[in-house]
DNA sequence: GTAACTGGTTACTAAAAGGTAACTGATTAC
DNA sequence: GTAATCAGTTACCTTTTAGTAACCAGTTAC
């Protein structure tokens, strides 16, 4: 798990910070969803997310592997291919994401009085 | 509401991003909780959070006011005092925070096999 | 009158996050 | 043999976020 500077914060917020570190950032959720959707290989994931660079994807995949959200397998054979598969643990994040999404939708209503009924569900 | 660069992301993730922008960052949750706990005045909030600078607090309070999580009232009288009070809308975040916290706790168990039973509930 | 408090702002600096592009070695298709 | 694909790494640059510290006007206590 990634250690960041949280020395001074209330201990009850530590797990909250952990979660935010794992799903925060510009790309982490996009990558996770791409893998959930069935994209398995590095270039496949990369191509599925416009404007995502090789460097960032590489770094994020390492973080996600460390956090046991995905498993990296090197398939021997020619050419050697790398496979990324989501863990069962990663899927427990879906509930959290849904909660964040619901709050966000409600927040927009609160701020803009937006009552439009678009289908905003995440299909994963 | 703060507009950031989300042009290219899936529309279903937009509300998720909104929520993450609002509770993400190093200080936002700490400040919100401090206000929930009853701290009302600028210096009072500042002093309640070690290492939080005047500049950052000022900026975060503006964001939070924009997002209707708090209300800023200037009380006329001498000396003129400013009061920050949480909105009812802000309190709907508690459920989200609890969800993040629970996931974080479970995640630690998953990663470290940590089964220690500390009282980690946020009292707000 | 001077030191300390109120609620901030401003300018400068440092660190973190993200972007760009070139490059690696190995393999395959033409 | 040349170009393209695979899975990345490396170096450098820009943007964003946060930290440091000085400063403002107005008020109060001594």
Image (cartoon, coloured by chain):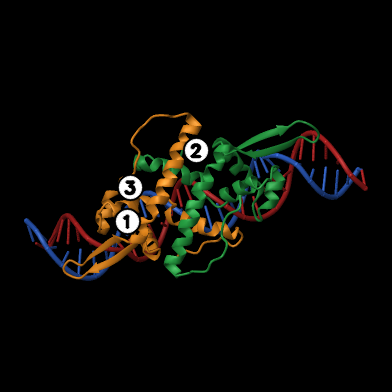
Chain colours: A orange, B green, C blue, D red
Q: Is residue A64 left or right of residue D1?
A: right
Q: Which residue is mark 2?
A: B2
Q: Do callouts 2 and 1 point to residues on the same chain?
A: no
- Mark 3 = which residue? A51
Residues at marks 2 and 3, CA–CA distance in whole angstroms: 22 Å
Identify which residue is drawn at 65% across, 55% down. B51
Neighbours of disc 3 within 10 Å: few (<14), some (14-19), many (20+): few
Q: CB atoms at circles 2 and 3 under 8 Å apart? A: no
User: Percent x, y for residue B41?
Assistant: 70, 42
Label 1: which residue? A54
Label 1 CA crowd tier, 10 Å (few <14, some 14–19, many 20+)? some
Secondary structure category for the residue under label 2: loop
Q: Residue B88, percent across and down?
A: 58, 37
In front: mark 2 or mark 3? 2
In the depicted structure, whether residue A85 falls above or below residue B32: below
- Which is in the foreground here, disc 2 or disc 1? 2
| Helix, strand or loop status at disc 1 | helix
Quadrant where the N terminus of chain A lies? Answer: bottom left
- Residue at mark 3 to residue at mark 1: CA–CA distance: 10 Å
Q: Quadrant of residue D24?
A: top right
Label 2: few (<14), some or many (≥20) within 10 Å? few
Residues at discs 2 and 1 in contact (Cβ within 8 Å): no
**Image-based side of C11 in relation to B97, left or right:** right
């Amino acid at each position: 798990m990634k250690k960041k500077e949280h020395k001074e914060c209330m201990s009850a917020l530590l797990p909250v910070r952990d979660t935010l570190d794992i799903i925060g950032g510009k790309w982490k959720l996009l990558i996770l969803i791409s893998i959930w959707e069935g994209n398995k290989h590095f270039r496949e994931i990369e191509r599925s997310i416009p404007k995502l660079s090789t460097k960032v994807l590489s770094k994020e995949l390492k973080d996600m592997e460390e956090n046991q959200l995905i498993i990296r397998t090197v398939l021997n054979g020619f050419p050697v291919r790398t496979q990324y598969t989501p863990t069962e643990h990663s899927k427990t994040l879906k509930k959290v994401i849904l909660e964040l999404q619901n709050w966000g939708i409600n927040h927009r209503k609160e701020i803009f009085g937006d009552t439009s009924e678009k289908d905003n569900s995440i299909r994963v």
